[in-house]
Amino acid sequence: RQALINLSHDGWLETVKGVGTFCRTRVAGRELSTNIAYVSFFTGSYIFPEVIRGCDHVLYRKGFHLLVNQSEYDIAKERNILLNLKKKGVDGIVISPIYSDEHPESSNADLLRELRAQGVAVVLTDNCYPGVDFSCVRLDDREGGRIAAAHLWERGHRRIGIFYQSDYQVQQARRQGVEEFLLACGSTMNEAWRIAFTGQGSH
């Protein structure tokens, strides 16, 4: 038992409560760092502070250290962060990646795939790369948009519009959910009420 505890502490094993203890994936010649990086658009707004606290709470109990980074929704800065993390040799990366259907060629999925091939665990949150097989934790944003529209509709509102970020896949999905709900109700959104903006703006 003590041997398993020591191996878990050193990062060789992972214990899942109620399931069992497993060897962690390793790549020959690469030592575990006990550092896990988190990369978000901002660190002080939206859902990110809660995600950071959640990651830190779990990782600290398991003997890991959380390295927090913010890309400021800048694809070049995100890439530079990932390159620096690659040099540091982190053991895992949790990232809210910058990706837009409007500019699918502009992403750092290639670098994340390279890091994963070198044994770095990669988990995407909030946003994802369509067609790329990374582990991802995200909401059903299209359904969220539908529920929001239904809430307004049930209260008698018919002049329903949306203010959304057009170059952020998450908000595109919410817009689709709103429009699909209105269409199912035999209604459509006035073009003037569909207000799009780009970029995340100031945090």
Image: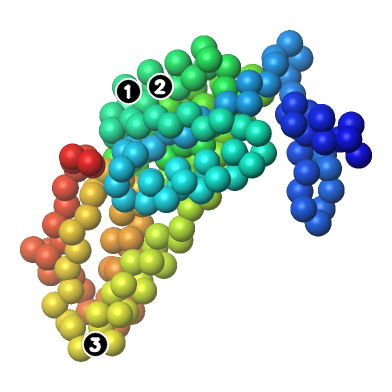
Q: Which residue is mark 3?
A: 155
Q: Nearer the viewer, residue 20 or 82?
A: 20
Disc 3 to disc 2, how far (Cα)? 46 Å
Report the residue marked by disc 1: 77
Tag 3: amino acid: Arg
Residue under label 2: 81
Residue drawn at the location 31% of the way across and 43% of the way down: 44
Helix, strand or loop at mark 3: loop
The three-letter amino acid code for the residue at tag 1 is Lys
Residue drawn at x 76%, y 39% as measured from the top left: 14
Badge nearest the viewer, 3 or 2: 2
Position of residue 9 relative to residue 199, above or below, is above
Give how far across and how far down residue 33 sits, in percent.
63, 21
Spatial CA distance of label 2 from label 1 is: 6 Å
State yes or no: discs 3 and 2 in contact (Cβ < 8 Å).
no
Which quadrant of the structure image shows residue 35?
top right
Q: Identify the element where label 2 is drawn.
A: helix
Relative placement, left or right, of 80 versus 122 is left
Relative to 62, say whether 149 is above or below: below
Is residue 170 at all visible to an observer of this figure? yes
Q: Is residue 41 above or below residue 105?
A: below
Q: Are marks 2 and 1 in contact (CB under 8 Å)?
A: yes
Q: Horizontally, is 197 left or right of 142 in the view?
A: left
Question: Disc count in the image?
Answer: 3
Q: Residue at x 36, y 74 (%)?
A: 147
